[in-house]
Every structure is written in structure tokens, then in C-alpha cells.
Image: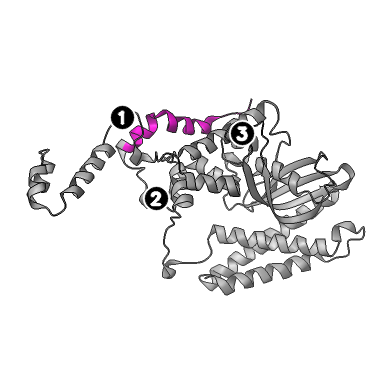
């Protein structure tokens, strides 16, 4: 108690600690850490997420490939990326507090239904037949009921009435969205040829370091094909529950340049490797990529299609996009995992381990050139 009182009075309690406490080294280490944490400087310290190279994790990236989702996570918040990806931290949930499926669960259910539905149509050669006699509504209803049943058998669903309402909402959404999608497929000449495709590719050696020759990977929800032009289209589904569209979902090229939406740019590269009708490595394919937003509350919903320019990797925008990806990958290789607070902190699963409310930490983050450069990505524009 006396040592504590001396410390609070800004007096050195070290002689007393050395004489009376069983672990004086613990106090000294703790004092040094507190001194570093409270320092008001313009440089990040080792306790601010500046780990330095993490060779084991980097070796895993080189071997397995880098996914766009993980890179988006790093662009959002390097510390969150570190805690979730490298440390595997997550918030523990108490079973008695689980009130039902969350947004991620509903997204998985929707993906499962759409995969089963379109696979059934592919197996029946629905898109290759001129006479559309297949009852698509009955097929959709059957696969929807099956998906809900499988989820109920393996996950808590919460209050029965609430779960029934959510089921009806999803069924109604998919009924309208699928009808719109089938109409669009009929008019455009596209038809699905592959679902839930895992893809890997090597980036060209001519790309800037550390991207040169680096492997990338990803899972594409759907690949469509238009025979008349030998053109492919990679589709990624996004379930949205908000009432309006977020800015990052409007201008996809700008969002990609900011590291916020990297899936479609990556899929433009991965899709060329997984094109089912590709006959040779030298064959040049025409490829598009689009998000299919399933958004029942958007004014333009329930199915909103947002496309990424097919030349996103070319010209001035392509160079800017490569710079963004190279910047993020190099920062990961250097082991920079500082905090970058924003609105997403409200939903962060590792917020308890974060010092976003510690003023001295935020002072350093706001002024260090490395964290500032990362933050400046959010203002990057095309052209």
C-alpha cells in the first residue's frame, strides 16, 4: 500500500519494492510498459501493434495464397485483422444469451439455398433447353425448406415465432430476387455453369513487390457464361439488411482502390483460371464481375446488381489498384498491426482487447506516418 501511495504521488517506490515485494522484476517491467503506453510522441511503439515481420504467417500466405476477404479485413483495421487472423481471438458466447441466427448465419443460409437451386437447374439442363417447362418456384421452395431444416438441426434458432418470421422474410426475398435473376438471364443470354468455385492463381512477375508471383485465392459464388460472345461473368452474393445502400457498395472501383471491396478485382483474376469452357492457357477470355445485392429494404431492391469495370486492372486505375494491394500486403509483411477505429468498432468481436479509447495511443496513431498512410487509403479516388 505504501508503494502504491508513493507511485500515485509521483515518487519512486523502487527501493521499497526491491526490499519488500517478492517479484520486484514484475513491477519494473510493468512500470516500463506503462511509461511507454503513456508517452505522447508522434511514433508508434512496440505496444501499439508494431510487431515487425511475422515469418510463420508470411510463409503461410506465400504457400496458401492471399484471400481478398482477409486483405479487406486488414484495410479496415490492422489490429482487428491481427487479433482475429493471427491470434484467432473471438468473443465467447454464452448459450443462454443466443437469441437466434445472426446476420452471418442468415447469409450462409441464403448462399446455401441459391447454390442448391441453381445446381438443380443446371443438372436438369434448364438453361440449355428452349422450352422452360420446369417449375422453378417449386424447386426454390423445396431447397429453401431443406436449408432451413438443416440449419435447425445444427444451430439454435431462438424464439419459434421470430424464427418463423425470419424464414418467411428470406423465402419472400429469394422468391422475388430469383424471379428477377431468371428474367435477366433469359434476356442477356448468360447461364450459370459453375457454383461455389474455389480458385487460386499467381500474380504476374511484372507486378510490384511484394505482389510479384504471389498466390491469391478465393471462392466465387457463381460463374455465368454467354456462348455468343464467349464471355464469362463472376457473381458474388451479398445479403443486406440495411434500409439504404452504403457508399462502399456504390462505386466499386473507388471502394477497391481504398481496399474496402477487393473481392471482385481478385475474382477477375481467379475467374480466368476456373472458366469451364477454357480450352488452353493461351486463350484470352472476356470476363465481367458483379455483386448481386439481396436487399429487400433498398428502394431499388430486392435484387440490385453492381458491376466492377472489367478493365479495373488496366491503365491508370489498374496501377492505382496494384499500389493499394501492394501497400496492404507489404504492411502485413512488415508486421504493422495498429488500431484504426471507425463505425465498425460497434460490431468488433475483439473490442475488449483494443485501446481505441486510450488517448495517448490514439495520439501516436494519428501522427505516425505509417498509420496515417493506411488511413489515407480511405480517401483514395480513381483517376
Question: Mark number for residue 254?
Answer: 3
Tell me: residue 383, above or below residue 275: above
Residue linked to disc 2: 351
Residue linked to disc 1: 41
Please tell me whether residue 112 belongs to the stretch shown in magenta.
Answer: no
Which stretch is magenta? Answer: 361-383
Name the residue rendered at 73%, 33% in the picture. 311
Q: Please, which residue is most extreme toward the right here? A: 130
Q: Is residue 55 visible?
A: yes
Name the residue rendered at 67%, 62% in the picture. 112
Residue 328 appears at what percent x and percent y? 53, 37
133 and 113: which one is in front? Answer: 113
290 and 280: which one is in front? Answer: 280
Residue 37 appears at what percent x and percent y? 28, 39
95 and 217: which one is in front? Answer: 217
Q: Residues within 10 Å of mark 3 (few under 14, many from 20)?
A: many
Gap between marks 3 and 1 measured at Cα: 33 Å
Residue 6 appears at what percent x and percent y? 9, 43
Left or right, 383 with respect to 74, comes to right
**Which quarter of the image is occupied by the C terminus?**
top right
Assign a secondary structure to mark 1.
Answer: loop
Name the residue rendered at 73%, 36% in the picture. 310
- Whichever of callouts 3 and 1 sits on the residue coming sooner in the sequence is 1
The rendered magenta stretch, by its main secondary structure, is classed as helix
Which quarter of the picture shows residue 284? top right
Callout in the foreground (2, 1): 1
Amino acid at each position: 500500500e505504501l508503494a502504491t501511495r508513493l507511485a500515485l504521488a509521483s515518487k519512486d517506490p523502487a527501493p521499497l519494492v526491491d526490499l519488500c515485494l517478492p517479484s520486484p522484476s514484475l513491477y519494473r517491467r510493468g512500470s516500463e510498459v506503462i511509461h511507454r503506453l503513456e508517452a505522447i510522441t508522434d511514433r508508434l511503439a512496440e505496444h501499439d501493434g508494431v510487431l515487425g515481420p511475422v515469418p510463420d504467417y508470411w510463409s503461410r500466405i506465400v504457400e496458401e495464397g492471399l484471400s481478398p476477404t482477409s486483405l479487406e479485413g486488414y484495410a479496415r483495421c490492422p489490429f482487428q485483422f491481427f487479433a482475429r487472423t493471427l491470434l484467432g481471438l473471438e468473443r465467447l458466447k454464452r448459450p443462454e444469451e443466443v437469441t437466434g441466427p445472426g446476420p452471418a448465419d442468415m447469409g450462409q443460409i441464403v448462399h446455401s439455398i441459391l447454390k442448391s437451386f441453381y445446381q438443380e437447374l443446371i443438372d436438369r439442363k434448364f438453361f440449355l433447353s428452349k422450352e422452360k417447362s420446369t417449375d422453378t418456384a417449386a424447386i426454390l421452395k423445396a431447397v429453401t425448406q431443406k436449408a432451413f431444416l438443416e440449419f435447425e438441426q445444427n444451430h439454435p434458432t431462438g424464439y419459434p415465432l421470430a424464427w418463423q418470421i425470419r424464414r418467411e422474410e428470406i423465402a419472400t426475398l429469394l422468391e422475388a430476387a430469383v424471379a428477377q435473376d431468371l428474367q435477366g438471364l433469359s434476356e442477356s443470354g448468360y447461364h450459370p455453369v459453375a457454383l461455389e468455385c474455389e480458385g487460386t492463381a499467381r500474380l504476374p512477375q511484372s507486378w510490384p513487390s511484394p505482389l510479384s508471383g504471389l498466390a491469391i485465392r478465393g471462392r466465387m459464388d457463381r460463374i455465368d457464361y454467354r456462348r455468343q460472345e464467349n464471355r464469362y461473368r463472376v457473381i458474388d452474393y451479398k445479403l443486406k439488411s440495411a434500409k439504404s445502400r452504403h457508399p462502399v457498395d456504390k462505386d466499386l472501383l473507388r471502394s477497391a482502390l481504398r481496399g474496402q471491396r477487393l473481392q471482385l478485382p481478385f475474382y477477375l483474376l481467379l475467374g480466368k483460371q476456373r472458366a469451364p469452357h477454357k480450352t488452353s492457357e493461351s486463350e484470352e477470355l472476356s470476363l465481367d464481375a458483379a455483386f448481386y445485392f439481396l436487399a429487400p429494404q433498398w428502394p431499388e431492391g430486392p435484387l440490385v446488381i453492381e458491376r466492377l469495370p472489367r478493365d479495373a486492372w488496366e491503365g491508370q486505375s489498374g496501377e492505382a489498384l496494384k499500389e493499394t494491394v501492394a501497400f496492404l500486403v507489404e504492411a502485413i509483411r512488415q508486421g504493422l498491426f495498429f488500431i484504426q477505429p471507425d463505425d465498425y468498432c460497434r460490431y468488433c468481436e475483439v473490442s475488449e482487447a483494443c485501446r481505441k479509447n486510450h488517448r495517448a495511443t490514439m495520439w501516436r496513431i494519428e501522427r505516425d506516418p505509417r498509420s496515417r498512410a493506411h488511413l489515407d487509403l480511405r480517401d483514395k479516388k480513381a483517376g
